[in-house]
Amino acid sequence: MSQIRIANKQDETHIRALAKDALASISQEIDLDGNDADLKNIEWSYFGHDGLFLVLEVNGKVAGFAGAAKLSDHAIGIKRLFVQPDFASGLEQLLDMLIDFARKMDYRLVECAESAATFAPAKMLSAKKFENKDGRLVLDVWSV
């Protein structure tokens, strides 16, 4: 049985372990003092910055995650988006929930960071109407 829910403090070690495995799959290491510092305190990094962090839970275990935080008054940035390969269908659900959150919070733009786009199929992002603008993948949620 699977569900998507809001992440909590107890999920952080599982999220970091999953992020470590995801990065290893593309020959990178997790850097909790650099690019991955947001994973040391998810509540502060996401909820504390007018954002959202979700987990895909399958049979009681974290199998994926998605996180976005405020970039400006009009934009939110997706920094995290990953699911284990066996649960790929959950990726689109997580992305849809982040986009829906952006609409409900009156953000106009959703920017997908490279760290998230690495694990999201380009075809899926294109189908959601993300466009390359000055080297950034951006969705205008008011135009779709």
Image (cartoon, rainbow, N blue to C red):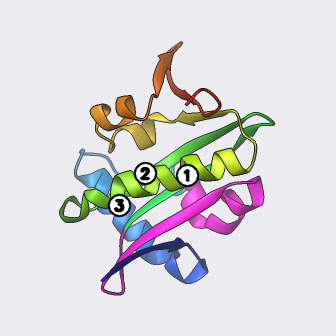
Assess whether residue 75 is covered by the magenta stretch: no
Mark-to-mark CA distance, 1 and 3: 22 Å
Mark drawn on residue 98: 1
Mark found first going from the N terminus, 2 or 1:
2
Mark-to-mark CA distance, 2 and 1: 10 Å
Residue 58 location (% of width, % of height): 32, 79
In depth, the one of 29 and 70 nearer the eye is 70
Q: Residue at x 50, y 78 (%)?
A: 11
* Residue marked by disc 3: 20
Mark-to-mark CA distance, 2 and 3: 13 Å
Outermost residue to the top: 134
Disc 2, disc 1: CB below 8 Å?
A: yes
- Mark 3, Cα crowd under 10 Å, few <14 / some 14-19 / many 20+, is some
Q: Residue at x 24, y 64 (%)?
A: 87
Residue 107 location, quadrant? top right
Look at the image and tell me whether residue 31 can be seen: no
Q: Kindly state the secondary structure of the residue where label 2 is placed.
A: strand
Q: Residue at x 32, y 51 (%)?
A: 23
* Image quarter of the N terminus: bottom left
Q: Kindly state the secondary structure of the residue where label 1 is placed.
A: helix
Q: Is residue 32 left or right of residue 73?
A: left
In depth, the one of 54 and 135 nearer the eye is 54
Residue 104 location (% of width, % of height): 70, 51
- Mark 1, Cα crowd under 10 Å, few <14 / some 14-19 / many 20+, is many
Q: Kindly state the secondary structure of the residue where label 3 is placed.
A: helix
In depth, the one of 63 and 93 nearer the eye is 93
Mark 2 residue type = Leu
Mark 3 residue type = Lys
Look at the image and tell me whether residue 67 can be seen: yes
* Image quarter of the C terminus: top right
